[in-house]
Amino acid sequence: MGYPSIDEIALQVRDWAFIHDLPEEFKGFTKKIKIEKQGQVLFICRYLNEALKARLDMIYTSETFDYILCRTMGLNEYRDIRFIYKQRDIFEREVGLNIEGILAEMASPEHRKLVYIVEEKGIPTWEYGNNLPKKIGSFELYIRPCEVIRHINGSFIFIDYSDFERKDQLVIMYNVLRDEIFAELKVAGVFRTLRVFDCNTLKELEGKLEKHLAETLDFVTNTDHEI
C-alpha cells in the first residue's frame, strides 16, 4: 500500500485536532500553526522561544513518510529519533505525552536530563568553562557547561560560541559512547574539519582553549564566506 502524497498530508493536518488543542504558550514558547511545504518537508506546527533562539517543530517528510519532532537551539538542529513515526496517531500520542517535558528541558538547564557519565565527567560544574568570556569578537557564548544540551549520537554540547548573523559557530561536545571531547566548526552554516580541541579530559581541554579558542574564532571571522 502506498503512502499519501505530501500535498494530501498537508490537507489532512489542517484539521488535526491534536495541534489545535495543544497549549498556546508553555515555558516561554509560543505555538504557531503554519502548514508549509519546503521541498520534501512539510512544516505543521512550531513552538518558538525567540529570546532563547529555540524552537520545536512538528514536521512530515515525504522522503521517509515519517512524522518527526525537530529540536533547534541556536544553530544546533536535529531530528529527535525518539519521535519518528509513520503512523500519525502514534506520533500524536507520544508527542502529547512528552511535549511539555521537552519544552521545559529546552527552556531551562534545571529540567535537562543528563546521563550520569556527563555529570561524573564534571561538565556542568566545570568552573573554567562556566567562566569563559561571554563575547569574543562577533561571537557570543550561547551555551556554557552548566547549560549542557543533548545532541545526536551520544553527544552533548557544552560550549557553543555562535555568530548568529553570519551562521558561524564553534561547538565543543562530549561523546558518552567514546568518552571523547571534540569540536565542530561551521562557517556560514557549512561544516569544517577541526581537530585541535580533541582530548579526553576537561584539564586537557582547558589548555587547548587557552591556546586555540581566540585564534579559531578569528580564523572563522576572516574566512571567505562566499565559498
Image (spheres, grey):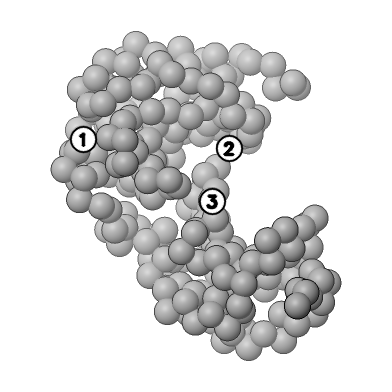
Which of the 4 quarters of the picture holds residue 158?
A: top left
The x, y position of residue 153, in whole percent, is 43, 45
The picture places residue 47, in percent across and down from the top left corner, at 56, 66
Q: Earlier in the sequence, mark 2 or mark 3?
A: 3
Q: Which residue is mark 2?
A: 164
Q: Nearer the viewer, mark 1 or mark 3?
A: 3
Relative height, residue 54 to residue 120 (above, below): below
Label 1 sits on residue: 126
Image vertical order of residue 106 relative to residue 132, above or below: below
Q: Nearer the viewer, mark 1 or mark 2?
A: 1
Q: Residues within 10 Å of mark 2 (few under 14, many from 20)?
A: some
Residue visible at 38% across and 28% down? 182
Locate residue 195 relative to residue 180 in the image: left or right.
right
Q: Pointer 1 and pointer 2: residues touching (CB < 8 Å)? A: no
The disc labelled 1 sits on which kind of residue? Trp
Residue drawn 79% across the image and 63% down it: 37
Three-letter residue code for mark 2? Phe
Which residue sits at x=79%, y=69%?
Answer: 6
* Residue wearing tag 3: 78
Measure how far apart labels 1 and 3 are at the Cα level: 26 Å
